[in-house]
Image (tube, helix red, strand yellow):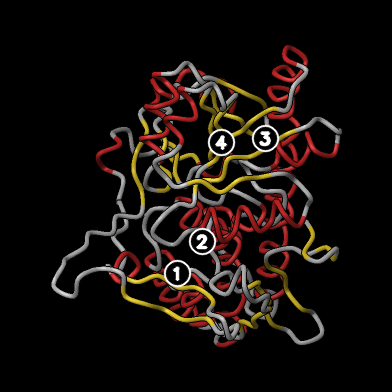
């Protein structure tokens, strides 16, 4: 997608300089900075500090992290240790482990003099596949938006949470991909963008990328969605997911569950957009999903730009107050209208997911 009318991916391998390049998302929307990753430690740090974030992009970064590890040291023990550290860098998004496991399986038994080229090809393939999957998610989700528009002949109001946009993937995004395809087809859409505390990924990233594509959007406080639904101002909710169980239960950014409850109570369709790489086929009980708890400073402090165009972080809580910063919650399958995948749309159930992907 575009930034200042120039096409970008969120991550790519620079053949000329033999390193990985990313868009540093901690600097958006106030600064656009491309950062180099030269070592596996750089990749791990980029994931931990959320310079890259979003389940599919984390997976792509981990794949390139394996490539960087091999460039440093082809010793199998070093590669294995690096793989474990990559998996541990963020615990909730299933794409991370999926990508590392896929890379290791591909490299199993490969000769030392071939391992780098094969690893790089596989990492490129993972990213290319994600881009195609997300494009197909958009084409499938477009049908839902088209159906709403054909009934009302009015602007379709879509509510989304956090950033499941192209910045969270390699390109297109998951939840935003149907929106981008609708916009390209000249269907009038408007997006309600939850600011998504504490890191404000909706306000900082989703609104930013929608602006760059010329799509009308309005940032709202996280607790505003319910009353908008009561007023009839939301036609559909589309969110992403960091891990979806084969049961249809959805783990996504904290606050998603409350949006699903509000949508359910107001008969607003609530869809989850995801590539199949985000499905966890092993865990059956959502209580077993590891929920990341991040630094409480993300809650107690807020970052912005001052009058001198300098980025500053300030304390907004009483100094003695404690804060709990859980990064994700779980939306039970019964509140999910459907899952929008690269293969089509299905209900959020083990029967439907197994039929579609197994």
Q: Which residue is mark 1?
A: 86
Q: CA distance from mark 3 to mark 2?
A: 21 Å
Find residue 247 and report its horizontal and vertical position in percent: 40, 27
- Residue 269, disc: none
State whether residue 226 is above or below residue 206: above
Of tags 3 and 1, which is closer to the observer? 3
Query: Which tag, 3 or 1, sits closer to the chain's start?
Result: 1
Q: CA distance from mark 4 to mark 2?
A: 33 Å
Q: Which residue is mark 2?
A: 100
Pick the quarter of the image with the N terminus.
bottom right
**Residue hosting label 4:** 159
- In front here: 336 or 185? 185
Specify few, some or many for label 1: CA neighbours under 10 Å numbering under 14, 14-19, or 20 or more.
many
- Badge 4 element: strand
Q: Which residue is mark 3?
A: 342
Q: Nearer the viewer, mark 4 or mark 3?
A: 4
Instruction: Say which of 47 and 301 sits in front.
Output: 301
Q: Residues within 10 Å of mark 4 (few under 14, many from 20)?
A: many
């Amino acid at each position: 997608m575009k930034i200042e009318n120039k096409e970008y991916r969120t991550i790519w391998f620079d053949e000329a300089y033999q390193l990985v390049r990313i868009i540093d998302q901690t600097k958006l929307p106030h600064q656009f900075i491309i950062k180099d990753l030269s070592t596996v430690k750089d990749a791990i740090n980029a994931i931990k500090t959320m310079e890259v974030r979003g389940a599919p992009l984390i997976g792509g970064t981990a794949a390139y992290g394996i490539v960087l590890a091999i460039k440093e040291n082809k010793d199998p023990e070093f590669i294995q240790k690096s793989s474990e550290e990559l998996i541990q860098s963020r615990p909730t998004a299933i794409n991370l482990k999926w990508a590392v496991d896929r890379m290791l399986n591909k490299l199993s038994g490969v000769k030392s003099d071939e391992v780098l080229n094969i690893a790089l090809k596989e990492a490129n393939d993972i990213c290319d596949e994600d881009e195609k999957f997300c494009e197909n998610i958009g084409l499938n989700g477009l049908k839902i938006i088209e159906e709403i528009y054909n009934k009302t002949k009015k602007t379709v109001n879509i509510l989304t949470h956090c950033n499941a946009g192209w910045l969270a993937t390699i390109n297109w995004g998951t939840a935003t991909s149907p929106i981008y395809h609708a916009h390209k087809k000249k269907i009038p859409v408007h997006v309600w963008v939850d600011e998504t505390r504490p890191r404000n990924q909706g306000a900082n990233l989703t609104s930013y990328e929608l602006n760059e594509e010329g799509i009308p959007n309005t940032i709202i406080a996280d607790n505003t969605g319910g009353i908008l639904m009561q007023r009839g101002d939301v036609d559909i909710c589309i969110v992403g997911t960091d891990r979806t169980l084969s049961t249809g239960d959805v783990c996504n950014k904290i606050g998603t569950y409350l949006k699903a409850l509000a949508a359910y109570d107001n008969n607003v369709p609530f869809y989850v957009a995801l590539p199949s790489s985000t499905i966890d086929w092993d865990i059956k009980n959502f209580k077993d999903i590891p929920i990341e708890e991040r630094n409480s400073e993300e809650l107690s402090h807020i970052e912005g730009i001052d009058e001198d165009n300098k980025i500053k972080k300030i304390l907004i809580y009483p100094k003695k107050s404690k804060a709990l910063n859980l990064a994700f919650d779980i939306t039970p399958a019964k509140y999910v209208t459907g899952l929008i995948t690269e293969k089509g749309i299905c209900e959020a159930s083990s029967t439907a997911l197994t039929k579609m992907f197994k």
